[in-house]
Amino acid sequence: MTYAVINDYIEKSKYPIKAKYEMTPTSITIHNTWNDASAVAEVEYMQRNGNAVSFHVAIDDKHAIVAVPFSRNCWHAGDGSSLTSGNRTSIGIEICYSKSAGDKYRKAEANAIEYTAQLLKKYGWGIDRVRFHKEWSGKNCPHRILDEGRGDSFKKSIANRLVELNKKLVTQVSKPVATKTATQTKGTYRIKTGTFKNASALADAVNKIKTDFGFVIHEAADTTSFNSDYRIYTGTFTTKEAAENARAKITAKYGWLTYLIDETK
C-alpha cells in the first residue's frame, strides 16, 4: 500500500493531559475509530480538545499521521495508569473510516497492516507484540475487525508481512558476504547461544530467530548440566563461512553471546 507518513505532534503544553508519562513501548495496540473521519480530522480533533484521551498514530487510505512521539504514553487502552498498563506501555494505532466506509476503510486497514509490520521490524518484535484494545480493557475495539470475525486473520496478515520484510533484510545482508568470500571451508557447523534464564525466555528467543531469520532450531534446550542451562542450537551449516555469517547476524541483532561449534568429522 502507498501512504504518506506525517509527524504532526501535539504541543508539549498538552503533555500533562494527553501524554503525561515518558514511555518505552513494549507492544502495539490496534483500534478502530468508530466514525468516518479522516486521519487528518482525527488528529486535529485530538490536538485541540482538552480530554484525557489520546493515541499515537491515525491511519487512513492516504496517511499515517504520528500525533504523539512513541517516547510518550497515550490514553487509549482504557486500563488505567499502572506501569504495565496498555496506556503506559503500548503504541496506540487508530484505523480510520471504520463506521461505515467501504473501499476507504479497506485501504486504511491495509495501510495499518503494513505500518504495524514495519514497526515490528523496527523494534525487532514478533506478532505477539500486537494487541487489540479489547485485550486491555474488554471494550469491543477494534469494533469492525472483531464484529466481522477477522481478529485472527488481521493479525496473521501482519505476521505474514513481517516475514516478508525480514526475508528481504536477510537477503540484503547476505549478498555482500557471498560476493566477497573467495573460498569456502566445508564441514558441519552449528551455532550455540549463551544461556537463557528460564524456559520462557528460551521460547521467546527461539521464536525471534525463527521469525527474523528462518533458521532451523535443532535443539532448544540443554538441561543436562547441574544448573539446567537453557540454550539454543541451530541446525547445521555446510560451510564455516555460512555459519560465521549467521552467527554474526544473531549477535548483531540481539546482542546475545554465541559460539561456533565445529562438528566436522
Image: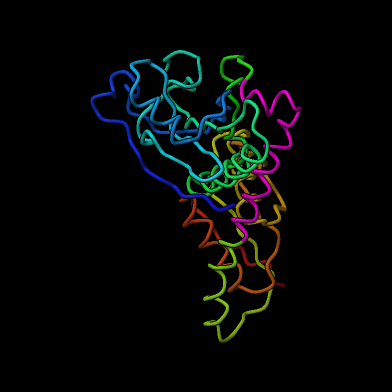
Q: Position of residue 205 (x, y in %)?
A: 59, 43
Q: Is residue 210 above or below residue 38?
A: below
Q: Position of residue 18 (x, y in %)?
A: 35, 22
Q: Is residue 10 above or below residue 49?
A: below
Q: Quadrant of residue 69?
A: top left
Magenta-colored segment: predominant secondary structure: helix
Outermost residue toward the bottom?
Answer: 182
Residue 146 on the magenta span: yes
Q: Please give the name of the residue rendered at 29% of the width and 24% of the height, measured from the top-left corner.
A: 15
Question: In the drawing, does residue 69 fall left or right of residue 93?
Answer: left
Frontmost residue, 247 versus 6:
6
Frontmost residue, 42 versus 186:
42
Q: Position of residue 40 (x, y in %)?
A: 43, 36
Q: Position of residue 232 (x, y in %)?
A: 63, 49
Q: Please give the name of the residue rendered at 33% of the width and 16% of the height, measured from the top-left corner.
A: 50
Total numbered labels placed on residues in the image: 0
Colour scheme of this structure image? Answer: rainbow
Magenta region: 141-167
Question: In the drawing, does residue 98 fall left or right of residue 86?
Answer: right
Q: Please give the name of the residue rendered at 56% of the width and 19% of the height, measured from the top-left corner.
A: 136
Q: Please give the name of the residue rendered at 72% of the width and 23% of the height, measured from the top-left corner.
A: 147
Frontmost residue, 85 versus 250:
85
Residue 93 on the magenta span: no
Question: In the drawing, does residue 255 fall left or right of residue 154?
Answer: left
Frontmost residue, 134 versus 206:
134
